[in-house]
Image: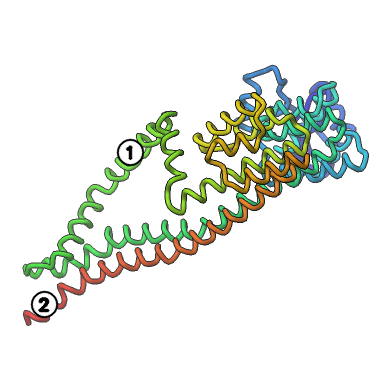
Amino acid sequence: MAAFDYNALDTSGQLKKGVIEADSARQARNVLRERNLVPVSVSESSASGKSGNKISAYKIWQRRRIGLRELSTFTRQFATMIAAGLQIEKALQTLINQSENRKTKSILAAVRAQVMEGRTLAESLGSFPDSFSEIYRASVLAGERTGHLEIVLEQLADFTEKSYQSRQKIQLALLYPCVLTAVSFFIIVFLLTYIIPDMIKVFTDTGHSLPTLTRGLIALSGVIQHYGVLLLGVFIVVSFFIKGIIANPDIRLKIDKNIFSMPLLGHLALQYNAARFASTLGMLQESRVPLLQALSIASAVIENTYMRQSINEVIKKVSEGISLSKALEQSGIFPPVLVTMSGSGEESGRLGAMLIQASAISQRDTDNRIAMLVGLFEPLVLLVMGGIVLLLVLAIILPIIGLNKMV
């Protein structure tokens, strides 16, 4: 079976859109007619490309993607249905019927079609790597092999929900300072471009010498008026140039290593990456994924290249027979709480649970530091903007005072 996108008219003449499963487009049209719908267009869904078709898979990555919020909801509902004893294809069909997002419907319909063809759920999800990450697919594969798919899906649901909540917290924390900075910047540029020049012109027409601050403001205003677009172009070019330099692996490695040495931000970056690593590794261990494979997957989700290199060294040591906690300690980069709790987990046989607890501790520390930095950043932005406004006011007032003295 394959998934088909359709446009059809109902009995009242309204256009209906959706996804339907059928062996061919002709059969899809017949099914639509049986549902009292008049087919307008029926085409194979771009989300139903075969796993061996690289071009089709590339198009899927570009056009079709389930967001983290939708993935969290889908996983929770899927886990509940599997735990209730529903077969995978029936659970997927129920989720397809319940989903209001056409993109999600297409992807789930394609996954279900591949499951009906005899593929495993993990293999079917593998056709959509941009929606279902390597962590997700490896956990599902482990659940299918061990016969504990419902447990794994519950753990995945918790993991995706926590990931979504963490992302939301960071975005909301940074939203106000970023908006405040952007609005303040555009207001100052507007004043320097359109308001200040007209006000200063009154003083320049008098022919008297102006204070240094006022002359500097006039010069700055002139530069923005005449060369603003050029400066913006230079800024964009320099940004791309810097981005190209940072893309160099050796330079990126040095930058990522130095980030951990920075005051305030260094500890924050370390705790954030450590929490993400511990959470991923812990969830994979709870899903019964082999340790070396779990370490390799957890390494892939780390953005900091220096920490990723350290994890690769940990993988090498663990493969040689060294315990995980000892390998983490020898790397010299991971927080002590992660090393200690991983050691406790190895001794008690509850490595996954202890890693998840270590992740929770690091995440709380990260949240607290983000809140502190945001709390410092907001008044700092206000002070800087206030200082700039004060300079603008002084640049206007000083010539007025000078004219009064001359009178």
Viewer-side label of 1, 2? 1
Q: Pointer 1: residues within 10 angstroms few (<14), some, or many (20+)?
A: few
Q: Which image quarter is the C terminus in?
A: bottom left
> Splitting the image into 4 quarters, where does residue 100 fall?
top right
Which percent across, then down, holds residue 47? 70, 29
Query: What residue appears at the point 62 percent right and 55 percent down from the top-left corner?
Result: 364
Q: Is residue 70 visible?
A: no
Cβ atoms at labels 1 and 2 below 8 Å apart: no
Q: Which of the pair 85/223 is nearer the observer?
A: 85
> Splitting the image into 4 quarters, where does residue 217 fall?
bottom left
* Mark 1 to mark 2 CA distance (whole Å): 44 Å
At mark 2, the secondary structure is helix
Residue type for callout 2: Leu
> Splitting the image into 4 quarters, where does residue 382 fall?
bottom left
Query: What residue appears at the point 73 percent right and 39 percent down from the top-left corner?
Result: 346
Residue type for callout 1: Val
Which percent across, then down, holds residue 136? 72, 35
Q: Is residue 188 visible?
A: yes
Query: What residue appears at the point 64 percent right and 38 percent down from the top-left corner?
Result: 325
Is 181 drawn above or below residue 357 in the view shown? below
Q: Is residue 59 left or right of residue 149?
A: left
**Residue topped by disc 2:** 403
**Residue topped by disc 1:** 238
Q: How is the image coloured?
A: rainbow
Query: What residue appears at the point 54 percent right and 36 percent down from the top-left corner?
Result: 331
Is 201 drawn above or below residue 358 in the view shown? below
Is 146 drawn above or below residue 223 in the view shown? above
Q: Which image quarter is the N terminus in?
A: top right
Q: Which of the pair 339/40 is nearer the observer?
A: 339
Q: Is residue 197 left or right of residue 92?
A: left
Q: How many marks?
A: 2
Q: Is residue 146 left or right of residue 136?
A: right
